[in-house]
Image (cartoon, rainbow, N blue to C red):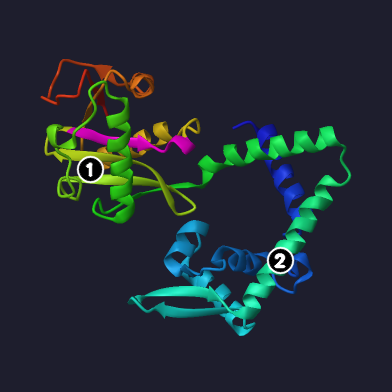
């Protein structure tokens, strides 16, 4: 990477940290560090499971426990087991916590207004547009990939979204029962794997693998949410699938796709996949690809 680019990013980070007061242990003048204030905001009026908090903010269990304990001592947060599942811990705001969160909202709005106040209208529009672009471009660095149980709620949601998109885009629709199978058992180790991409804990893409011993592995069920397209997530999912297949000992990776999925076909070709003769009886396939893995 270019050292000048790295220096610019670090300078930008310092400017933002100064502008929002992130370096102050009394963030927004409320007598607590920014991490505690951020948790109050994330817990919100409805409360949230600790697991969701960890995933959304990328926190380890120890840090989250210590920060929640500090907020409990301040009388702002209560952490209890969920009535419907005693194994799940849930954080909720007390009455004082809700009042404090409202005050943090007011003060945060004031800080944002303070950034805009010295600027004229044209400068404000430039800053807002630049911030929106920066936020979008920073999102890929926050995406996390993990092997997930294909029977989980989020995994099923991703695959259902994938099926719905195929049904809308294919000329004659899409019926999963007619397609070659990739069920939960086939996507669970040692038979296969399902990789889910998440941003702040929310699922926004997936890709699946099926393993066949010494034969080439199969790539299946690759999908990216429409809201996340244009950020290079498809290529990163493909990289993750290739890496995992290689670690499992696969020498080659195969896939089939439909002619209407032009952006996917372009991605496969750009990623080193070579079109080959049909190797499956997939009724919805028009193209078959293969790639040798490192």
Q: Quadrant of residue 178?
A: top left
178 or 154: which is nearer to us?
A: 178
The image quadrant where one finds the C terminus is top left
Q: Pinpoint residue 99: horizontal percent, then vertical percent.
A: 68, 74
**Disc 1 and disc 2 in contact, CB within 8 angstroms:** no
Which residue is found at the position 12% from the left and 35% from the top?
A: 214
Q: Is mark 2 on a helix, strand or loop?
A: helix
Left or right position of 41 against 148: right
- Above or below, comparing residue 34 to residue 271 in the picture: below
**Residue that label 1 marks:** 248
Magenta-drawn segment: 217-228
Q: How many residues crowd around disc 2 within 10 Å: few (fewer than 14), some, or many (20 or more)?
A: many
In this figure, which residue is indicated by the disc labeled 2? Answer: 104
Q: Is residue 244 left or right of residue 56?
A: left
The tally of labels here is 2
- Tell me, yes or no, whether the highlighted magenta stretch contains residue 108: no
């Amino acid at each position: 990477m270019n050292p000048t680019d790295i220096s610019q990013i670090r300078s930008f980070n310092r400017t933002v940290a100064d502008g929002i007061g992130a370096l102050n242990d009394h963030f927004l003048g409320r007598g607590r560090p920014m991490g505690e204030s951020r948790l109050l905001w994330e817990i919100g009026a409805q409360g949230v499971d600790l697991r969701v908090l960890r995933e959304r903010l990328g926190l380890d269990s120890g840090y989250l426990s210590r920060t929640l304990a500090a907020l409990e001592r301040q009388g702002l947060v209560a952490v209890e087991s969920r009535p419907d599942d005693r194994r799940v811990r849930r954080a909720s705001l007390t009455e004082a916590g809700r009042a404090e969160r409202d005050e943090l909202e007011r003060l945060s709005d004031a800080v944002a207004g303070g950034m805009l106040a010295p600027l004229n209208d044209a400068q404000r529009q430039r800053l807002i547009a630049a911030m929106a672009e920066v936020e979008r471009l920073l999102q890929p660095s926050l995406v996390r990939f993990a092997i997930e149980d294909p029977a989980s709620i989020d995994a099923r949601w991703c695959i259902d979204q994938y099926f719905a998109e195929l049904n809308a885009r294919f000329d004659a629709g899409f019926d999963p029962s007619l397609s070659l199978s990739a069920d939960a058992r086939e996507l669970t180790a040692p038979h296969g794997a399902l990789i889910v991409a998440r941003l702040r804990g929310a699922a926004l893409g997936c890709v699946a693998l099926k393993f066949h011993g010494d034969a080439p592995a199969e790539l299946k069920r690759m999908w990216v949410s429409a809201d996340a397209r244009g950020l290079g997530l498809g290529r990163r999912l493909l990289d993750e699938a290739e890496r995992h297949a290689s670690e499992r000992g696969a020498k080659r990776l195969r896939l089939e796709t439909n002619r209407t999925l032009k952006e996917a076909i372009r991605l496969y070709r750009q990623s080193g996949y070579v079109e080959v003769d049909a190797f499956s009886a997939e009724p919805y396939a028009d193209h078959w690809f293969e790639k040798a893995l490192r």
